[in-house]
Image (cartoon, rainbow, N blue to C red):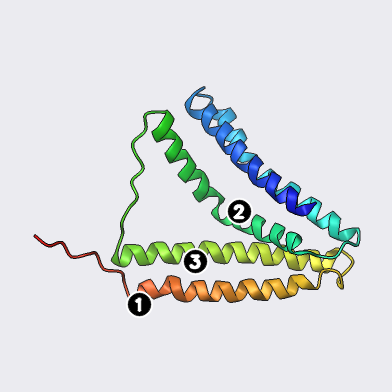
Amino acid sequence: MIFWLIIADEIAFWLFISMGLVTRYIFIKKRLSFFLLACTPVLDFILLIFTFFDLKNGNPATFAHTLSAVYIGISIAFGSKMIQWADAQFAYRFAGGSKPEKEMIYGREKALRERHGWYRHLVAWVIGAGLMLAIHLFAGHPEETQSFLTWILRWAIILVIDFFISFSYTVFPKKAPQRNN
């Protein structure tokens, strides 16, 4: 059930964003648009409540429960960036906005962007791992949620690998391609 709830949450996330952008650019209702866009974190809260009570009722933690915590962490850490991207795309395609350019960046600017991406990943891990740990401690069935501790460690390993990749751009900056005249 949790797996399907995650899928429904993702669909609802993009529906609220779409409705918010249509409301902003087509109907020119800024307040309503803000309200619809602000509903997206509520979806994550609902997913968290369902996950907690599913485990509180004694169900063993599955990969879907883990994915729920990971999804919430990523949604909170990267959600604003996803909304900015969708906003720029919608403004360009439907509201006469300028075309979003895919920036080709190099050197210090590229290194800075990669580090910021890693910082967001760290925030996602702190939130997701914190949720898994809190549910493990407070759901009342620690033996049923023991797998959360393994997944926290696995995600930490991924975070460390991402650290080395992201910060490698600081040590070895990506150079702009040479132009031949």
Give the residue furthest to the left: 181
The image quarter in which residue 170 lies: bottom left
**Helix, strand or loop at mark 2:** helix
- Front-most of residues 70 and 36: 70
- Find disc 2 in the rendering and name its residue: 76
How many residues crowd around disc 1 within 10 Å: few (fewer than 14), some, or many (20 or more)?
few
Q: How far apart in space, not on screen, are marks 3 and 2 (Cα)?
A: 14 Å
For the C terminus, which image quadrant?
bottom left
Q: Earlier in the sequence, mark 1 or mark 3?
A: 3
- What residue type is disc 1 on? Val
- Find disc 1 in the rendering and name its residue: 171
User: In percent of the image, x 29 and y 63: which residue is there?
Assistant: 106
Q: Earlier in the sequence, mark 3 or mark 2?
A: 2
- Front-most of residues 67 and 130: 67
On screen, residue 23 above or below 136: above
User: In percent of the image, x 36 and y 42: which residue is there?
Assistant: 100
- What residue type is disc 2 on? Ile
**Helix, strand or loop at mark 3:** helix
Q: Is residue 94 left or right of residue 106?
A: right
The image quarter in which residue 74 lies: bottom right
Q: Pinpoint residue 49: horizontal percent, then vertical percent.
A: 79, 51
